[in-house]
Amino acid sequence: MSTVKIGFVGVGDISGIYLKNITERFKEIEIAGICDLVREKAERAAEKYGIKKIYKDMYELFADDEVDIVLNITRPYEHFEVSLAALNAGKNVYSEKPLAATLEQGAQLKKLAAEKGLFLGGAPDTFMGAGIQTCRKLIDEGAIGTPVGAAAFMICRGHESWHPDPEFYYKHGGGPMLDMGPYYLTALVNLLGPVEAVSGMTRASFPQRLITSEPKNGTVIDVDVPTYTTGLLRFKSGAIGTIFTTFDVHYTQGARLEVYGSEGTLLVPDPNGFGGDVMLLRAGSKEYEKIPLCFNYETNSRALGLADMAKAMQTGRHHRANSDQTYHVLEIMESIIKSSDSGHTITLGSGLERGAPMPGGGTEGILD
């Protein structure tokens, strides 16, 4: 079976791990070529990873018959326009998170992909890693009894002290919910199923942020999005969840995800990664026990969802990091913010069927 060829639109900070994993780890996909608005970035990546094609722009990439999937790793507010153009050109699309900056844009992409019979999906794919898949297996097997609730926390002081170009985190399409929320919400809907209603409260604690990282040290950013966001989630199953994301807080343990059941509690690894410790507290016990991971992909495996999409294209099955999921997560996030603005609980319009779990065993880099 021939490999599926990927065309990169964007060669920014996150692209390195995609480039590395596609060229070194995943056996059923390969890079057809790359492009970036800053050609020097594309040239450096091409030299480092032995990539033969550099396109002058994304439209030249879309016109290349060799490209089977467009990998959209542009800035969040650019996701929609790039994905829309790629779909209109007849290309399957895998996008970094979020699917789009607004639910209306996400719906337009889903509709267009369906009309054209194209695959559409995207990050995060961390839920496919060994950590969260082990947690899913435990929950599905009844290790904590009936799930009754969950809590997710992503707490930090923002990106302006370390990121080389942090401004977009505080602009349309950014903020802690749209930036980091997808990791936690994608994990939660894979563990507990779809969300049916949300309520939220949000604010921007600081109207401006000062960049102290290089090369833009001293630049002041105007904050256009909420940076302190809390949400309540009612799952279709009846479980109740909370999610808290912020760029406004000094904190040392900024990532936490817990699932509570009638017979125990599960501490889920940081969903920004693929592995991590799975800790289970059983009813009647006073101590958590560490549960061995029982799936592949413990280390940084970004492009796993992309490789799964490629395999699904070849075999006709559903891919796990699909647009139903990325759209549902986008609706949860947007509805939390809308709830804060309106003061009302919002019932979601989208649903979601959990995708198939990852298989145990097998060879890393080759999908089922």
Image (cartoon, grey):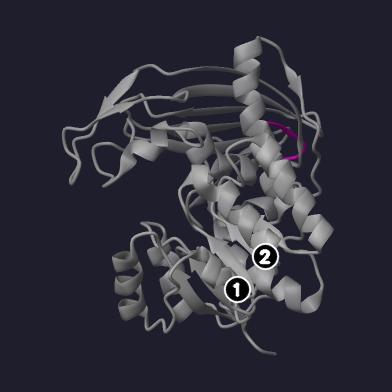
Q: Is residue 293 left or right of 104 when viewed as pictured?
A: left
In depth, the one of 156 and 204 nearer the eye is: 204
Q: Which residues are magenta?
A: 143-150
For the residues labelled 2 and 1, the Cα–Cα distance comes to 7 Å
Measuring 68% from the left and 60% from the top, which residue is drawn there? 87
Q: Which residue is mark 1?
A: 63
Mark 2 and mark 1 residues within 8 Å of each other at the beta carbon: yes
Q: Could you say which is closer to the camera, residue 82 or residue 50?
A: 82
Determine whether the residue tagged by mark 1 lies in a helix, strand or loop.
loop
Instruction: Check the image and name the residue furthest to the bottom.
Output: 1
Question: Is residue 12 placed above or below 105 in the rendered structure?
Answer: below
- Which residue is found at the position 55% from the left and 45% from the top? 183
Left or right position of 355 against 79? right
- Quarter of the view holding residue 342: top right
Residue at image location 67% in from the left, 73% down from the top: 310
Mark 1 neighbour class, 10 Å CA radius: few under 14, some 14 to 19, many 20 or more:
few
Percent from the top left, x then y, of residue 288? 53, 42
Q: Is residue 234 above or below residue 315?
A: above
Q: Earlier in the sequence, mark 2 or mark 1?
A: 1
Can you tell which mark lies on residue 188?
none
**Residue at 47%, 36% in the rendered image:** 174
Q: Position of residue 12 (x, y in %)?
A: 38, 58
Residue 89 has which mark? 2
Q: Specify whether residue 149 is painted magenta.
A: yes
Instruction: Evaluate whether residue 60 shows in this view.
Output: yes
Q: Amino acid at mark 1?
A: Ala
Where does the N terminus fall, quadrant-wise?
A: bottom right
